[in-house]
Amino acid sequence: MSPDDKPHSDSESLLVDPSTHMESFRRTRHNRRTELVEDYVELIADLIEDGGEARQVDIALRLGVAQPTVAKMLKRLAADGYIQQRRYRGIFLTDIGKQLAEQSRERHHIVESFLCAIGISIETARIDAEGIEHHVSPETLEAFKRFVTQTIAFS
Amino acid sequence: MSPDDKPHSDSESLLVDPSTHMESFRRTRHNRRTELVEDYVELIADLIEDGGEARQVDIALRLGVAQPTVAKMLKRLAADGYIQQRRYRGIFLTDIGKQLAEQSRERHHIVESFLCAIGISIETARIDAEGIEHHVSPETLEAFKRFVTQTIAFS
DNA sequence: TTTCTAACATAGCCCTGGCTATTCTTCCAT
DNA sequence: ATGGAAGAATAGCCAGGGCTATGTTAGAAA
Ligand SMILES: [Mn+2]
Ligand SMILES: [Mn+2]
Ligand SMILES: [Mn+2]
Ligand SMILES: [Mn+2]
């Protein structure tokens, strides 16, 4: 065999170096672990603002999961200090919870507005934003925000 | 109590209707389940193209996980018909696997290019794209593609 | 005040996707 | 030809995030 039997010889071709590659995947895995927490506190904040209280059944309905699934998750959120639970009463956000909810809500809104600004239908924007939001870094969020502002200015 | 004790009375305020909300979350959960498969086949395709073979150690190194984690996942991919495994030999993509890899790679590339096109640094674009790609619908992907093409045309 | 129902709690199951520790195989160097 | 090391397989653990089935409780309606 020649020393050149590998498709891209020594130049390492298209692939980025392993540690850079690894870092991206690690970050993505980390984002995935915080996704649910963000969606829950955001939804709880919305429900409270909208109807005065956040109940398990409503959370379950809007998330499209079963009530015990919500119950288990709420225990985790309580253990992690995001919410306060009173048995057979509603859910209340702690200060930490409110803060995370506010951040999540703002980021979510910017992402959705951005998608609309580049011409995507509101239905699709809503769906895609629900997943994309959790993987948008501060730098990207700033770029999205700028873009939305500019687009509005030119209309 | 007055009939108006709830913050937003009858207009249902800011929240979208429950079933629409639910649909977004369901889609996002579905996308999450396919994320890993997409990243694996894409990475395997890249490794084969780059070095002639895809080995567990290299996959593990680039994903930032342990080798048995990769081994277990590869069994699933084989069971699902994306790859072919020969004990103590490398990984080979089936036709289905190649097809998914190609789709994933293209989508990934468009997302990353798009982020760069709106002014995000390549480092951040790489990281964010790794997560965002899995939540981009065909409609959004088309919009991203158009935007990239236009941006290149005007430079 | 009592009853009944909707909401909540709890138990117990499953799958996914991580990990460590250990045991094969292969294959290269000696 | 053989030994060792690198790579792959296997076993067994854990947490997260789903589910169903079932028991409990609070509060409204009667
Ligand atoms: Mn959100
Ligand atoms: Mn979301
Ligand atoms: Mn990818
Ligand atoms: Mn990815």
Image: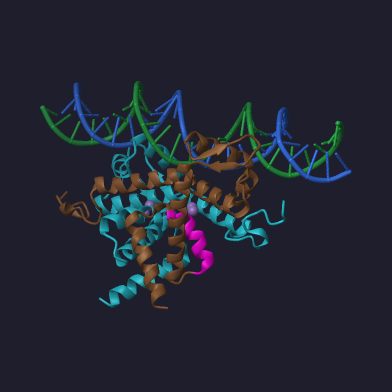
Chain colours: A brown, B cyan, C green, D blue
Image location (x, y in percent) of residue B93:
38, 51
Residue A18: x, y in percent? 25, 46
At horizontal 65% and vertical 63% (from top left) the residue drawn is: B11
Q: Is residue D7 left or right of residue C7?
A: left
Relative height, residue B102 to residue D2 (above, below): below
Q: Is residue A13 visible?
A: yes
- Name the image quarter holding residue A75: top right
Please indicate, yes or no, whether residue B80 appears anywhere in the rendered image: no
- Expressed as whole percent of the image width and height from the top left, the position of residue B68 reads 37, 34
Which is more toward the observer, A77 or A4? A77
Q: C7 and D19: which one is in front? A: C7
Q: Is residue A42 above or below residue A83?
A: below
Q: Main secondary structure of the magenta part?
A: helix
- Residue B59 magenta-drawn? no
Task: Give the quarter of the figure containing the C terminus of chain A.
Answer: bottom left
- Nearer to the camera, B70 or A148: A148
State the image quarter where residue B143 is shown.
Answer: bottom left
| Left-right relation of A18 to D15 | left
Q: The magenta stretch spans which residues?
A: A121-133
Front residue of this view, candidates B76 and A82: A82
Residue shown at 67% from the left, 53% from the top: B5
Residue A106 in picture, x, y percent from top left: 44, 57
